[in-house]
């Protein structure tokens, strides 16, 4: 009996130790599940059951237990009954994790939106496109390449191919359609960069200026430019690890103001010589944008009025943190068609239906490889400058999000290709097939 009690005691101590060691991870696990659930239900109009069996159905997130309050528009997630997180939905700002009870009733500003144009045909409006049949396109080959992505192992949700302003192929997985809002994850970084490009074109900002951060002015960080931040080449410390408790996960699931975390990090490298991918840097940039506006309302409005709604991405929702700052690293939702308009804006070198939102020089800027990135990264866009995709032109560039969210811009082919799904895929083979459809 004594031996049994000793064994039981040791087991109990071990279990307690495991719980204590992993308790901080439970906060992140429940936080991810609650936030994703709230966004999925209240932005994308999915059900709890659908989200649990698809978006949240991967380890260890699938260990959390979720509940949704449709009346009060919130979602809660419990990690083994030991820790519960809540995410609330705020109209116009999306879903956000709460940190204290008062967050649920706090006042917040709502961005102003432009009215959608439902009369003009795609891409400049939301009415059906005026179809054109291109004699130089092998439509069967395009569809064959697209169909390959809908093999069950790829978990693709949407694919859209646009050629010379025309949707020439469009396909959705069961449960999705042209009105389905899809999460871009880190493609939001490319939206953020575009806001800088528009502001630079309007004369409101110069990305080669020093970053306007007061807390950096008494140390070596004062040398960091906005350009260094856009190119992820600031030299600041940052741990972008989503499998552990890291700077990135603490920022997304534990911070009230996500724009401050990177600001407080020390310099561990030399600016312009230390490329390091950092979601914290993108959110810091979102905070920097805020300083160029007199009011918070103007900051919230500018992204939509001068960019998103102006090019007809009317389905888009940018999500904000508890302080009301757009989460420029990660959280933006829109239909595949609206994401394609974003790609077309770049394909057209910033000219949208006769209005120049940003210059061709800006396009060249975001496509310029960052020092230290081996030709893979520009200014919040990914590049093919070193032919990582060997069967794709080197001047192709793209917005890239977690689990294979993509908006590819192919200038030589006059094409934009959009893909959404839940895992990565053979991008080179897919793109090669679509490109080869042009005779």
Image (cartoon, rainbow, N blue to C red):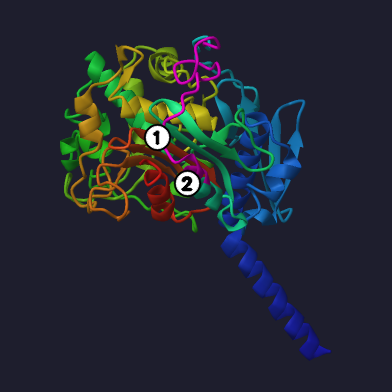
Q: Earlier in the sequence, mark 1 or mark 2?
A: 2
Q: Position of residue 328 (x, y in %)?
A: 42, 33
Which residue carries the number 1 mark? 416
Estimate how packed mark 2 is, as few (under 14), some (14 to 19) or many (20 or more) residues with alpha carbons within 10 Å: some
| Count of labels in the image | 2
* Stretch in magenta: 117-143
> In front of the other: label 1 or label 2?
2
- Comparing 335 with 161, the one in front is 161
Q: Position of residue 135 (x, y in %)?
A: 41, 32
Q: Quadrant of the C terminus?
A: top left
Q: Quadrant of the N terminus?
A: bottom right
Estimate how packed mark 1 is, as few (under 14), some (14 to 19) or many (20 or more) residues with alpha carbons within 10 Å: many
Which residue carries the number 2 mark? 141
Secondary structure of the residue carrying numbered label 1: strand
Q: Position of residue 323 (x, y in %)?
A: 48, 27
- Comparing 172 with 372, the one in front is 172
Mark carried by residue 203: none
């Amino acid at each position: 009996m004594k031996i049994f009690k000793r064994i039981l005691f040791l087991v109990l101590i071990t279990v307690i130790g495991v719980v204590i060691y992993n308790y901080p991870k439970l906060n992140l696990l429940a936080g991810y599940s609650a936030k994703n659930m709230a966004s999925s239900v209240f932005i994308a109009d999915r059900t709890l059951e659908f989200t649990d069996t698809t978006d949240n159905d991967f380890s260890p997130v699938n260990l959390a237990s979720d509940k949704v309050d449709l009346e009060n528009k919130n979602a809660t997630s419990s990690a083994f009954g030991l820790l519960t997180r809540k995410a609330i939905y705020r109209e116009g700002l999306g879903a956000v994790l709460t940190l204290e009870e008062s967050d649920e009733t706090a006042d917040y500003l709502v961005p102003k939106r432009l009215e959608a144009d439902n009369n003009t045909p795609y891409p400049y409006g939301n009415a059906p496109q005026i179809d054109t049949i291109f004699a130089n396109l092998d439509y069967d080959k395009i569809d064959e390449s697209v169909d390959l992505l809908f093999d069950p192992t790829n978990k693709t949700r949407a694919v859209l191919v646009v050629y010379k302003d025309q949707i020439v192929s469009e396909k959705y997985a069961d449960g999705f359609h042209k009105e389905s809002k899809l999460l871009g994850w880190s493609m939001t970084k490319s939206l953020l960069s575009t806001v800088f490009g528009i502001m630079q074109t309007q004369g409101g900002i110069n990305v080669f200026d020093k970053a306007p951060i007061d807390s950096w002015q008494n140390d070596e960080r004062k040398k960091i430019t906005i350009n260094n931040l856009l190119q992820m080449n600031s030299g600041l410390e940052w741990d972008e690890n989503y499998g552990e408790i890291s700077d990135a996960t603490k920022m997304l699931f534990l911070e009230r103001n996500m724009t401050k975390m990177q600001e407080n990090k020390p310099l561990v490298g030399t600016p312009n010589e230390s490329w390091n991918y950092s979601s914290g840097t993108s959110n810091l940039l979102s905070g920097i944008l805020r300083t160029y506006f007199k009011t918070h309302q103007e900051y919230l409005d500018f992204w939509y009025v001068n960019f998103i709604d102006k090019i007809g991405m009317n389905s888009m929702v940018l999500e904000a943190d508890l302080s009301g700052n757009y989460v420029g690293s990660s959280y933006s939702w829109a239909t595949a068609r609206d994401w394609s308009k974003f790609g077309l804006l770049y394909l057209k070198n910033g000219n949208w239906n006769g209005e120049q939102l940003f210059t061709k020089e800006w396009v060249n800027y975001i496509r310029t490889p960052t020092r230290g990135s081996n030709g893979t990264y520009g200014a919040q866009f990914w590049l093919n400058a070193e032919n990582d995709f060997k069967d794709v032109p080197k001047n192709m560039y793209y917005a890239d999000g977690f689990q294979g969210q993509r908006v590819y811009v192919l200038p030589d082919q006059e094409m934009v290709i959009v893909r959404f799904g839940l895992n990565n895929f053979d991008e080179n083979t897919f793109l090669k097939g679509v490109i080869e459809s042009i005779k």
